[in-house]
Image: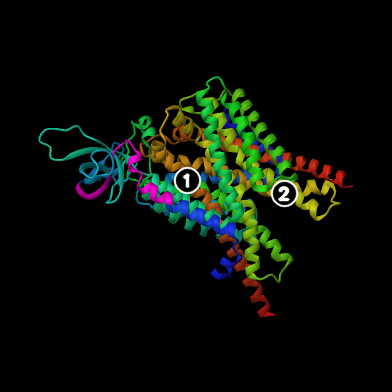
């Protein structure tokens, strides 16, 4: 094990500068997010006193038992012209907290002030929402620290690639939102090419392995998109319940296809880079390995990753629907209807992603073989 | 014909052609895992059952299916299984804490409009459900990373039986670092794809930055992405350590016996 002394000795000036910079931004952002009240237009308050006023048992139409509580809160206003004054708030919440919150001393909330009524002592207000920015920031920092500590350089690259991809996506959507005439699929196609190149080069460097993986990934996702599009056309979209795309301001089929396209990209990239690095690994170990042997080993590797990769997508998509499934079940919705209403799009995404994963195995294999052959021809 | 049936049929044929018998098992595992999720949700409907305990049991079954059914029961899958479970428990404790603090449970105001016909007083603890959702989203990736590390570590140990525990642990970390970027990307893009409609919604209704970073839905989804990233990262040292510990310890015992 390293002692701290050794670690400090081994660090170069660049490292120290980097860590100092990280530490500084950590502290600065924490200080900022705890004191950024004046940047918000909506009034923010901090709860200073909580009294439980009442507790009632409620039984709904479907015999679900729950308790409803009423809290009376005193809170200090943190911004605006009422800053420093106390405001009185009422809050109802239930034990299940599906759409309400229980507040404690120290919680920060967005409120609106009630219009002044006669005979009222002091300010009253209505709670709008919770101030969550500080929690998001803390989780982000924990994420960054864990990735840096465990992943070192590769961890840093993952963070950089996440940030670049997120910014790129946000920018691409800006273009889409502001230019109605450009198709979302076209924008996503261009973004997908950029995402692929950026992520794979950041993760793996600029070399033949990466080139093979980039080509295999692009072939994989575009063929997946094409198959999904055909499947939608052939069946005229039967079985898909678009009403579960709750947030929808645009033609839903295109938004769904674009999401499917983007969602399968990560898994397809993963398969493509696994195939190309392991096949190049085989070639580097034995320069004279026959193409037949490469195909055989490559297919074995592909079989090994196929199962777990398709499962990753299934869980990533379907799990998000658990709360809404519970709401439906508890409201006595029929079982089959609940599943088709809430899971059709997630399952379609998972299945299409799975198709992408499986297709990329031979695509990655043969693309890499092409690069291996070229390298061999060059060297001989 | 139904789109889902058609897509499932295409996937099934492709898996059989490319994967043979293992492909068939992977396809069946997909359906078994889906079944586990649905059964878990049905069991969560009982208000007397703790959703967290249920989630842990579900994760054990899911890892079991993904590791022992698709692959086989051997040293590699056993260490991967143990590491997945331990990583899941670690991650769960953190997630429980943060979902409670950030109050990201249940539904956001954007979702509530369409759900107004429903009763929300259903007697289940949505804070715990929210933690379950994050864990279940990540469990597939956690098991995948665990097996991707423990499998080559076993190979290394097989080829160099004299390797010390510390060296083997470091080798595991290095393997983990190499796959970290791609595993994280798999999850990031899966979530980006799932949240695309939400992102367009924010842009179309021109939410201000302040509104976005404090909204429940955005926070819930960002925290899911970040926790998933932490999950696939934390599993790296945990798997490396457990695998190194189990493999090298055994070696010492056998040499003593001889």
Q: Are marks 2 and 1 on the same chain?
A: no
Foreground residue, B255 or A239? B255
Q: Position of residue B144 (x, y in %)?
A: 60, 51
Foreground residue, A269 or A318? A269
Foreground residue, A327 or A45? A45
Tell me if residue A51 is in the magenta stretch. yes
Q: Which residue is mark 1?
A: B224
Residue at the spot x=65%, y=67% of the render? B167
Relative to residue B156, is residue A239 drawn left or right? left
Tell me if residue B97 is in the magenta stretch. no
Query: Quadrant of residue A115 in the image?
Result: top left
Q: Residue furthest right?
A: A380
Pointer 2 chain: A
Query: Quadrant of residue B122 in the image?
Result: top left
Q: Is residue B3 above or below residue A377?
A: above
Q: Is residue B189 above or below residue B101?
A: above
Distance between the alpha carbons at the discs numbered 2 and 1: 30 Å
For label 2, count other residues whose C-alpha is less than 10 Å away and answer few (under 14), some (14-19) or many (20+).
some
Relative to residue B128, is residue A16 drawn left or right? right
Q: Does the residue at mark 2 contact the one at mark 1 (Cβ under 8 Å)?
A: no
Relative to residue B249, is residue B215 drawn left or right? left
Residue at the spot x=58%, y=64% of the render? B241
Q: Is residue A44 above or below residue B256?
A: above
Pointer 1 chain: B
Q: Position of residue B98 (x, y in %)?
A: 40, 51
């Amino acid at each position: 094990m390293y002692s701290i002394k050794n670690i400090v000795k081994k660090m170069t000036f660049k490292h120290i500068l980097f860590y100092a910079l990280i530490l500084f931004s950590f502290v600065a952002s924490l200080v900022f997010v705890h004191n950024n009240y004046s940047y918000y237009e909506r009034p923010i308050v901090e709860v200073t006193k909580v009294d439980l006023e009442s507790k009632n048992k409620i039984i709904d139409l479907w015999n679900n038992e729950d308790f409803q509580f009423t809290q009376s809160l005193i809170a200090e206003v943190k911004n605006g012209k009422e800053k420093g004054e106390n405001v009185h708030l009422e809050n109802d919440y239930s034990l299940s907290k599906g759409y309400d919150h229980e507040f404690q001393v120290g919680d920060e909330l967005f409120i609106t002030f009630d219009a002044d009524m006669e005979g009222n002592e002091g300010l009253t207000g209505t709670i709008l929402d919770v101030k969550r920015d500080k929690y998001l920031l803390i989780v982000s920092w924990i994420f960054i620290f864990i990735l840096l500590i465990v992943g070192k350089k590769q961890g840093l690259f993952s963070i950089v690639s996440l940030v670049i991809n997120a910014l790129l996506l946000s920018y691409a959507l800006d273009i889409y939102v502001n230019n109605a005439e450009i198709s979302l699929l076209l924008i996503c196609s261009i973004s997908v090419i950029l995402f692929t190149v950026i992520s794979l080069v950041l993760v793996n460097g600029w070399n033949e392995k990466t080139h093979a993986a980039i080509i295999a990934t692009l072939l994989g996702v575009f063929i997946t998109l094409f198959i999904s599009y055909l499947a939608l056309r052939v069946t005229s979209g039967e079985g898909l319940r678009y009403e579960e795309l709750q947030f929808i301001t645009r033609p839903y089929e295109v938004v769904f296809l674009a999401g499917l396209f983007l969602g399968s990209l990560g898994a397809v990239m993963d398969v493509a880079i696994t195939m190309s690095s392991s096949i190049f690994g085989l070639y580097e170990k034995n320069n004279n390995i026959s193409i037949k042997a490469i195909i055989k080993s490559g297919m074995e590797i592909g079989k090994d990753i196929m199962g777990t990769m398709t499962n990753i997508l299934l869980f990533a998509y379907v799990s998000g629907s658990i709360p809404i499934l519970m709401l439906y079940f508890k409201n006595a919705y029929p079982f089959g209807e609940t599943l088709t209403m809430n899971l059709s799009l997630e399952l379609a995404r998972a299945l299409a992603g799975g198709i992408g994963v499986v297709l990329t195995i031979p695509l990655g294999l043969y693309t890499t073989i092409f690069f291996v052959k070229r390298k061999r021809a060059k060297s001989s | 014909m139904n789109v889902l049936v058609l897509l499932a049929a295409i996937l099934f044929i492709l898996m059989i052609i490319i994967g043979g018998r293992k492909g068939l098992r992977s396809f069946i595992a997909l359906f078994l895992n889906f079944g586990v999720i649905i059964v878990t949700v049905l069991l969560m409907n009982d208000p007397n059952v703790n959703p967290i305990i249920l989630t842990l049991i579900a994760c054990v079954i899911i890892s079991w299916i993904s590791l022992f059914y698709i692959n086989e029961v051997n040293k590699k899958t056993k260490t991967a299984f143990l590491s997945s479970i331990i990583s899941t428990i670690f991650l769960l404790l953190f997630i429980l804490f943060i979902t409670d603090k950030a109050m990201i449970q249940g539904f956001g105001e954007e979702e509530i409009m369409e759900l107004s016909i429903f009763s929300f007083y259903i007697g289940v603890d949505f804070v715990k459900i929210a933690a379950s959702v994050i864990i279940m989203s990540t469990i597939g990736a956690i098991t995948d990373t665990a097996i991707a590390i423990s499998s080559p570590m076993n190979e290394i140990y097989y080829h160099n039986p004299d390797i010390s525990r510390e060296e083997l642990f470091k080798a595991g970390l290095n393997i983990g670092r190499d796959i970290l970027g791609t595993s994280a990307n798999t999850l990031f893009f899966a979530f980006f794809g799932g949240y695309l409609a939400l992102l367009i919604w924010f842009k179309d209704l021109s939410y201000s930055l302040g509104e976005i970073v404090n909204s429940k839905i955005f926070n819930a989804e960002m925290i899911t992405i970040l926790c998933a990233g932490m999950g696939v990262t934390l599993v790296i040292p945990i798997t490396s350590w457990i695998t190194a510990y189990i493999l090298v310890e055994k070696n010492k015992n056998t040499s003593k016996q001889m």
